[in-house]
Image: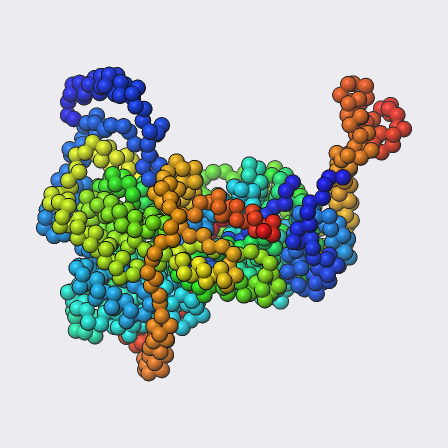
Amino acid sequence: MPARRAPSRRSRDSVRSLVDGLLAGDKRAAGKLISLIEDDEPEAMDVLARVHPHTGHAHIVGFTGPPGVGKSSLINRLVRAYRARGKKVGVVAVDPTSPYTGGAVLGDRIRMADTGVDPGVFIRSMATRGHAGGLALATFDAVRVLDALGMDLIFVETVGAGQSEVEIATRAHTTVVVEMPLTGDAVQTMKAGIMEIGDVYVVNKVDLGNEDVLVANLKFQLEPRDGWTPPVVRTAALEGRGIDELADVLEKHRAHLGSSGILLRRELARAKQEILENAQRLMAQRVQGLSRLGATFERLARQVADRRLDAHTAAQRLFDPAATRQRRS
Amino acid sequence: MAKKIRVLIAKPGLDGHDRGAKVVARALRDAGMEVIYTGLRQTPEDIVEAAIQEDVDAIGLSCLSGAHMTLFPEVVKLLKKRGAGDIVIAGGGIIPEEDVQRLKKAGIKEVFGPGTPLRDIVQFFETAAKGG
Amino acid sequence: MADSEERKKLEKELRRWEATTLKDALKALPERRKEFVTTSSRAVKRLYTPLDLPDTFLKRLGKPGEYPFTRGIHPTMYRGRLWTMRLFAGYGSAEDTNERFKYLIAHGETGLSVAFDMPTLYGYDTDEPEAKGEFGTCGVAVSSLEDMQTLFSGIDVGRVSTSMTINGPASVTWAMYLAMAEERGVSRSSLRGTIQNDILKEYQAQKEWIFPPEPSMRLVVDTFEFGSKHVPQWNTISISGYHIREAGSTAAQELAFTLANGFEYVRWGIDRGLRVDDFAPRLSFFFNAHNDLFEELAKYRAARRIWAREMRETFGAKNPRSWLLRFHSQTAGVSLTAQQPEVNIVRTTIQALAAVLGGTQSLHTNAYDEAYQVPNEKAARIALRTQQILAHESGVANTVDPLGGSYFLEAKTDELEEDAYRYFDRIQGLGGVIPAIRKGFFQQEIANSAYRYQREIEDKERIIVGVNDFVVDEQPEVEPLRVTEASFKAQLERLKRMRRTRDKKKWERSLDRLRTACEGEENTMPHILEGVKAKATLGEICDVMREAFGVWEEPLLY
């Protein structure tokens, strides 16, 4: 077992009392619980076990799209719109950790400055901490905490690079792809696969003009999926244009998910994926630790490197030491 | 992996001189910390709310307009009221020596004047996060 | 350098010198560093010779008082009239600052310059919640016409020129000044002064904006129009590089961004339908006077040359007064140290020298205690004396452009000019100044330069005396300057009384008319004037504008 870190200020608070606070709406408790999970503290699993039964209420909306396209400003305006509709909103904004320094400047909160003190809003900035793709490992666990806090909607803002679209599409209820028109004559190409990912497509910064081609392009390529044709919404976030329309679309999608049974299907698919991912992580931890399994792992690896065993049989033997080579048919 | 230190860098009040705040934010990032920069024109309430939601280890307040004696202690007070008095606060900007002493008495752990080497500031936050 | 024969001879000479005299000297004593750089981290050669100057050098240099004005905007410069010694001043209430004005005038300053407090700069009255804790700490609080009257009590505004450093609400403060002068029977045509009124650099550097760019530019052009018709001796804008530099830019960025902003203002004026020669002569500039003497000199000269060329060639201005770049300068606040503050007097002197050698029209010198506070009286007096020494004892004012012809200086001037044009191209490529602001271009360039500069200091590549070398463990003795509770109360009283006693109907009507004008296309100045005279406060007028124009949110990158 790796040496335990000295208990920090954070882990001194009892998990149970923090979760009680969370369920009563205490934001400080929410902040601390998210930190426990982010830092992978020993108490993190306990936290998640206690929090999970209280989730399932919030509508989770993921936002992806290239950097500079206006995701933060868009989210900021949506938060305001939903607050005006009497809803509580959480935001998890992810920014990349520098691979060189391990640090990060998390700047999405700035664009949400005016909503930060609203009691019905909770904003958490998160760094990817080395996780590939546009999210942090802890992102959707943080979403669960906010769900249990009582948020009606939770917006997740990705970094916008790498495979963030795929990650978010499998975890969020509604995936919003945000694009903006290019200036000049350059032909606008979309990232491969992005057409299959989104439930809603937003063309932001329409105040700059030049958006008709992009909008037409999108509409042409978008196909219906599970009875839903992804709409294209035009917005100019900084001017507040198109925001109510977008909010309406999001509510419509939520209703669609619920009424068509898709929500349940997706929850199941998501649960399976998460369990598998957690199992993979656990497995990786176990085989790399100082344990009997770890020793077995080392032994198997040497056998594979010496050509005495193939890697597939080796993997089977991790589960079942008696497994023999399977003939491929 | 060592635990990440989270710091909130904030500009309370109307002062728009953000050169120092941004340079410090970058330096902390280069030292491996996660820095949430609040942007300009933050009220003490904005800052405290952000510190709580982000569960930061420490806050750095920057003010060059002379309003520090009102704004900095206000942040200290609000943090305590919200049960977050364990978050360490440092201040920086145009602050005469007399005020430095008064701020420290009011609960500001350290005040960094013009010319403070960045490594001193980095070290301060590293120590503060450990509970030192 | 007209002769290529001449050039070849000089090249040969230089190579000979390098191979013999220099080589021997370096063997005996190597140079202290691998590379020597300016404050902006630009390389500086060991030696500059006629070879560093282009063949067209003399033509590009020109004569003072003639296009392209590289050597100065007057043929006689300081032999005719010294620069205006104009110390930026303001703190506390209007009474406090009025006292400081009189003190400075008594000690020989020749122009007034007003510093306003944060709430005023952002269009808030002293009694508004946003002003909490910020009254009078970095400038004077002016919330109304009455405050303006008090501020200039006992001062003949018909005789002295006044500069007001204010941007977002500049038209309102200007209107207060004009109304104040009117009440005293001073004619508008005799009023001399400047309002900074440069909103573009706010978005880029100083961040004291209120409204978004387009309505703010409209307000600025309203002042150009109004000024050209009614206040002919007033500079309705001071296009500034000072703040851009203070925020961390290099000299080249300061030069390029300032001039790019200047061209943008000209474009907007022309788009309004004004003839360029009607308003361009009243555009003025404001540059930083930083540490690196020759780099600063080169910057001022390049600025004059570029402005003259663009105004004549690109904007087609015919009046030579439209080609003149007149500027105020201020020694670099950001270079002042909190450690061993008396040493700041030395820094300020060298910086002021740069401004004077560079041909500034007006100069502010910082006080040595400004790393701690707004200057106390003694410190402000020394700052003024610094200028007086330069003017009367140093001899540098006795000839025009004394360093003109220096190979180093001329080469640096050309280099900065080229740098500026490269930036102009980049800004153009981004769609122009305002689109570039929205994309965060200037802000990012400035932040990057600021970070690089700080790293140089951290790594001791750049020495700051008293800070990272030559350090002493001393507690500096600085006499504090405090804003008193009494001043604050007096200001609140004045505001309360005014709100109570003003003619409510007149006040309401004026604000309604202003609202209509803001929402339409009329020039706002006459309506702002009416509002000010009807005793509307700064905050009330700005609120009307905030409603009509919206407020600006910073498009930050981090």
Picture residue at 60% right of the left edge, 52% below the top:
B131
Horizontal placement of C256 versus C410: left or right? right
Q: Can residue C104 be seen?
A: yes
Q: Position of residue C513 (x, y in %)?
A: 34, 73
Place of residue C131 in the rendered image (x, y in percent of width and height, measured from the top left):
41, 67
Give the image location of residue C354, x and y in percent.
23, 44
- Please determine whether, in this image, residue C388 is positioned above or below residue A98: below
Q: Which is nearer the eye, C130 or A266?
A: C130
Quarter where residue C18 is shown: top left
Image color mode: rainbow
Quadrant in the picture for the N terminus of chain C: top left
Q: Is residue A290 above or below residue C370?
A: above
Q: Is residue C441 visible?
A: no
Going by the picture, which residue comes out furthest to the right? A322
Name the foreground residue: A274 vs C142.
C142
Q: Nearer the viewer, residue C2 or C87?
A: C87
Instruction: Say left or right for A298 vs C40.
Output: right
Q: Residue at x 59, y 66 (%)?
A: B81
Q: Is residue B49 left or right of residue A38?
A: left
Q: Quadrant of residue C549?
A: bottom left
Q: Residue at x 21, y 62 (%)?
A: C104
Q: Residue at x 32, y 55 (%)?
A: C369
Q: Position of residue C345 (x, y in %)?
A: 27, 50
Tally of numbered discs = 0
In front of the other: C19 or A269: C19
